Amino acid sequence: MKNYMLASEHTRPIVLTGEQSSMEDDCACPDGATILRFDHTLAMENDCACPSQTGFARLESAPGILYEQTPRTHTDSLPGGFHLAFSPYTPAGPSALNAPAWERWQSFRVPRPLENPVDETLAQENLIVPVGGQFKLRTSPPETLIAWLHLTNACNLSCLYCYVHKSPEYMPEHTGLEAVERLIETTQERGFPRLKLKYAGGEPMLHFSLVKKLGQKARALARQTGIELEQVLLSNGTRISASDVEWFLANQCKLMISLDGLGKAHDRMRPRKNGSGTFERVARTIDEILLPKGMTPFVSITITKMNANSAADAVRWALTRDLPVSLNFYRQPDHRHNQNGLALEDEIIIQGMLAAYQVFEEYLPTRPFLNGLLDRAQMNAHLHTCGVGQNYIAITHEGKLAQCQMQLHAPVAQSLQGDLLSLVSGGNIHNISVEEKNSCRDCLYRFRCTGGCPLESLRFGQSPNCKIYQALFPAALHLEGLRLLKYNGYLQ
Ligand code: SF4
Ligand code: SF4
């Protein structure tokens, strides 16, 4: 356990003491009460189609006069007399309450009216709720259409967990250009303000000339139609040159690189076809090509039974370079196929993840990192784990339409004709709301985890990772509490 140096003076103003309240402060506000809130997020890049950051949910409550502590609120001690508080209905992440604010929250064990701005802030965070109120989450429609462009089946690596059926095939240029046109049309027709393209494979850098052509077409059409364009390329990090980086920077295309351990641990998971390791090459790409040119890649770590105990080393390597990191769980290609014995084993994964969290605690970035800590969990309250069937489309190298990148072998349509979103919503994966999942209905974390990957739920009946999520959420929330203290100048 780390010993904390508490800051004697705050290095930045304390923001959140209910200052957005419209209530008059009639001097009933407890002296010096301070509530630090999770108030912004950093979208993390990973393979999947995360729910849109704008899919924020708000709690509807019946107007009530008396408020009480929200049942099942999770609390935890933090340094400096602060406490962490997180309720199932918290709009985003947890809050950190100093001693007077904590005392005030405790007073709501007995129902009482809102009397001061701190009460109002507690109510905004849904840490107190109207007695007898009815609660329902309301999500706004997603604002981004997300598309996986599967540019090639080819790859220069043979990763142990890869679900792509490898072949030299790649997307012909005319197929790619048609895909971009259809995606722009769909974005317009469905009224999304934004389109996000994920250049993927296989290894998309093997066909970088195609990436550039598609990017050029997408930018031109986005300009014409007024659509905001986001681009990210998912790479193994072994085929990126200095001149390629100029294109990424000039075209505002983000980069996600996979790193599954340090040295031999990474090499074992992600070898070349001839068996040689790739860690040295990936490290060189980041240290000698990307960072010197001012390009910050997202680092994605895929956790399997085999590399869970290396996750901490990979996190340390990334955090020493101030890189954003996401920890994602391995998914079996289908329920019968446990590749190389990689399937998650709860205790091994939990111990490996907790060791990785200790490294986060040691470095404690002030940049938000909570959304990258626990697979698909996202802290803004939401109802669906990913955009499958709603705002996510995967396009195969042959120009076929699939529900998700793990279903490329089972397309829902053989071409890109028709209403693409209607076609994907009719596929086998039913991306139901967490409120419809019996096993999740009473879970404290249901609006963050939302029941895990819908494809795994289809295969296994419910998330096979529930025990892991439940074991790790408290530790992940605790880390966010520490980050809030540091960000606001309470920790050195
Ligand atoms: S899968 Fe488990 S942790 Fe996730 S919402 Fe359902 S019950 Fe909660
Ligand atoms: S169904 Fe699962 S694998 Fe597919 S995009 Fe959603 S979370 Fe990812």
Image (cartoon, helix red, strand yellow):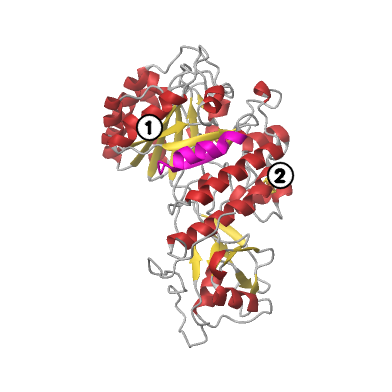
Q: Of residues 245 and 410, which is closer to you in this image?
A: 245
Please provide percent x and percent y for residue 97: 55, 69
The residue beneath circle 1 is 286
**Which residues are the magenta region?**
309-328
* Residue 118 position (above or below residue 318): below
Q: Amino acid at mark 1?
A: Ile
**What type is the residue that disc 2 sits on?**
Lys
Q: Name the residue beneath numbered marker 2.
A: 467
Q: Residue at x 49, y 54 (%)?
A: 140
User: From the viewer's perspective, is residue 304 above or below residue 387?
Assistant: above
Is residue 150 among what the camera can see? Answer: no
* Residue 193 point in image, percent of width and height: 38, 46
Can you say which quadrant of the picture contains the N terminus? bottom right
- The crowd level at tag 1 (other Cα within 10 Å; few <14, some 14-19, many 20+) is many
Q: Quadrant of residue 456?
A: top right
Expressed as whole percent of the image width and height from the top left, the position of residue 57 reads 53, 57
